[in-house]
Image (tube, helix red, strand yellow):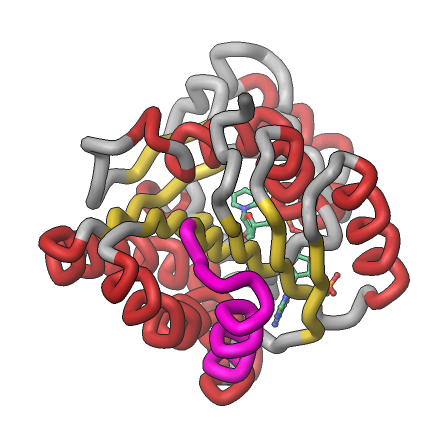
Amino acid sequence: MGLLEGKVALITGATRGIGRAIAVKYASEGADIAFTYLSSAAAANELVAELESLGVRAVGYRSDAASYEEAHTLATEVNKTFGHIDILVHNAGITRDTLLMRMSQEMWDSVIDTNLKSAFNITHAVAPIMARQRSGSIVYMSSVVGIGGNAGQANYAASKAGLIAFAKSVAKEFGARGVRANCIAPGFIQTDMTSVLSEDIRASFVENISLRRAGTPEDVAGVALFLGSSLSAYVTGQTIPCCGGMRG
Ligand code: NAP
């Protein structure tokens, strides 16, 4: 029997990278999967087929994480279709990197809206459902740069730091109703998001990682499985780095 048998997981931004690996890991442990994407409809259809081949129900929803209205419509739809929502993984995120003095207002706003306001949107929509169920696990995808900051990523680092304090607050507000909230802080993970970095920058990252390799989406999915499952039943308000021992 899988660790997530009988559970329904809603994962934002699951067509690629880390979100996709979490969807596949959760499905392989028996969870039915609702997931979102923004632009990649073909990838969403492929993912549904892959998840169904693992013997679970899977539905992809086009839903912009930055939209309050779309998040609420999504939560209602998922709850109606699947009957309950046991795990929420808020993974959708973007980067718009540049040094602060070159950063436009649009670069700041789009990252804060997609990465942080989105957490408010989806939690505001899903947490009441979980509170009524008297159980639920929420996982936010933060980042090591949300802990240590990073030159050229002031917008992104601020959004990811915000998620850490947000998760702690949700944990305190909803703990009495059996709802847990935690963050994962990945380090340097090989996905589309990091494929734009130059070889030099990638090599300098790896130099600073104790395990001397970039992480894989599957590495992060393992931590997400822990936080989504009852293995972490007494863990809430925490941030777990998944960074191969990256030095700050
Ligand atoms: P990725 O490969 O760029 O994938 C991002 C996913 O988010 C895609 O499925 C994308 O959907 C979705 N998405 C983007 N904007 C969205 C929106 N407004 N509404 C709904 N979905 C949206 O990213 P990744 O590297 O897997 O990163 C996943 C998460 O981990 C992000 O929050 C990121 O900040 C965090 N993280 C990544 C790293 C890393 O090294 N990769 C490190 C630390 C933290 P579409 O394809 O449809 O646009």
| Residue that extends furthest to the bottom in the rendered view of this protein | 69
Please report the residue visible at 63 percent of the width from the left and 76 percent of the height from the top: 63
Relative height, residue 43 to residue 116 (above, below): above
Q: Quadrant of residue 189?
A: top right
User: Along the horizontal axis of the image, is 228 left or right of 80?
Assistant: left
Please report the residue visible at 41 percent of the width from the left and 51 percent of the height from the top: 86
* Residue range highlighted in magenta: 71-86
**Residue 43: image x %, image y %?**
85, 56
User: Along the horizontal axis of the image, is 147 left or right of 203?
Assistant: left
Q: Nearer the viewer, residue 203 or 42?
A: 42
Residue 57 shows in this picture: yes
Q: In which quarter of the image is residue 18?
A: top right
Please report the residue visible at 41 percent of the width from the left and 45 percent of the height from the top: 145
User: Along the horizontal axis of the image, is 28 left or right of 54?
Assistant: left
Q: Which of 225 and 7 is in front in this view?
A: 7
User: Along the horizontal axis of the image, is 248 left or right of 205?
Assistant: left
Q: Quadrant of residue 194?
A: top right
**Residue 245: image x %, image y %?**
43, 18
**Residue 95: image x %, image y %?**
59, 60
